[in-house]
Image: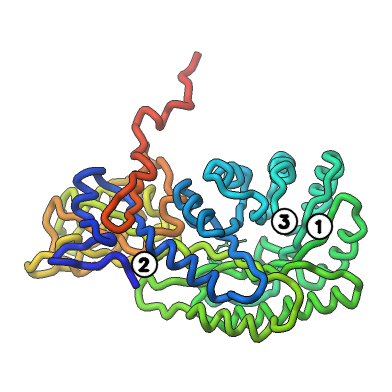
Amino acid sequence: MSAFEYVDGELRAEAVPLAGIAARHGTPCYVYSRSMLTQAYREFDAAFEGIPHLVCYAMKANSSLAIVDLFARLGSGFDIVSGGELERIVAAGADPRKAVFSGVGKTDAEMEGALAAGILCFNVESASELDHLAAVAGRMGLRAPVSFRVNPDVDPLTHPYISTGLKESKFGIEFAEAPALYRRAAAMPSISVRGIDIHIGSQITDLGPYREAAGKVLGLVDALATDGITLSHIDFGGGLGIRYRDEAPVALADYARMLRGLTGGRREALLFEPGRRLVGEAGVLLTRVRLLKPQATRNFAVVDAAMNDLLRPSLYDAWHAIDPVRPRAAEAKLWDIVGPVCESGDFLGQDRKLALQEGDLLAVRAAGAYAMSMSSNYNSRPRACEVLVDGESTLLIRRRETTAELHAQETRLP
Ligand SMILES: *Cc1c(COP(=O)(O)O)cnc(C)c1O
């Protein structure tokens, strides 16, 4: 259930009117619901109750410290993709021993940091990465825990930019090459072979690709076992979609039933790397209409949030619902909701039927994932603030950046 509902003609986050948050903290502002975040994690975790498993929140979806802290308190592990994310989980008080480290281009320094922190596993994506990792671990006198990310060559039926499990993708190791690589890794003194993982894409709304990929990976695990290589975990990655418009997301119960059916009786622990599914629907981006610019062919509503705050519409042509915080009774017109950034691609939504006046507040929905974490300072715009709502209380979890901070690391010519 959404915590963002209308009560007495105005949109609230849990028990707090969004207009009050905008008045107090200004706009643009991200607002998250603690109860929705908690519920999303608990639902995922509970779906696999009774079997050894670990949910590793893919924190690139939203890496704000308070969000990481919240999931850590709920017992979550983390899927990290950089040394910066490792430092974030440590700063948030989370346990690096519950972190898996994904990504195609880990540096030696990142490997060293993760080995020193004692992470759960490196998700290794190439033969060359294995050699680099073995060398780093060898120098440190340690054994690096390793899982290979294999590429099952499955079409996740989603946007090409967020498809990662096709042969053509830069991600993962080709299936046919995996057995030889496992044999090689098993013989390396500074490597400890632990698991296998897949991640086929994002915003997946069909169970079919998951079933196909899981079947392939389990077949590979069995083939490895006949080779004498036994694994302690199987990581099914992330990618479960959410509802932005009219999608029918995969029900967690169906996803879990499918995987329970395929893995029943196995001894490996199951790992998951959900990102979007845990945070996407739990956030909105609050923005205020600066001015209205009706034109002959299109009507533009210029708002104070822009592509630097929320890149998804510009980058992937993503659709987010945009709702008035206090709906007006007046006649609605079609509006393009655009930001002040100097790019034609700077829009949050197009052809939205709304009754608008200057100064109105809008809520861009399902903005909890790949939103704040993808924000930038393009056009020298300070990044937005973030507020976490918990029942009747609000907590400013990131204050708005100042313009002075934007150039604090820079120097003028000597
Ligand atoms: C991004 C990513 C995820 C999370 O994807 P979602 O679609 O947000 O669930 C999980 N695993 C890896 C390796 C990723 O790169």
The residue at 49%/68% (across/down) is 42
Element under disc 3: strand
- Name the N-terminal-most of marks 2 and 1: 1
Q: Image quarter for residue 218?
A: bottom right
Residue of label 2: 319
Image coordinates for residue 250, horizontal then vertical, percent: 49, 79
Looking at the image, can residue 344 be seen? no
Residue of label 3: 121
Q: Residues within 10 Å of mark 3 (few under 14, many from 20)?
A: many
Q: Residues within 10 Å of mark 1 (few under 14, many from 20)?
A: some
The residue at 38%/42% (across/down) is 398
The residue at 89%/61% (across/down) is 186
Q: Nearer the viewer, residue 113 or 153?
A: 113
Of tags 3 and 1, which is closer to the observer? 3
Callout 1 amino acid: Ala
Beta carbon at label 3 within 8 Å of ligand 1:
no
Q: Image quarter for residue 169?
A: bottom right
Residue of label 1: 127
Image coordinates for residue 377, horizontal then vertical, percent: 40, 40
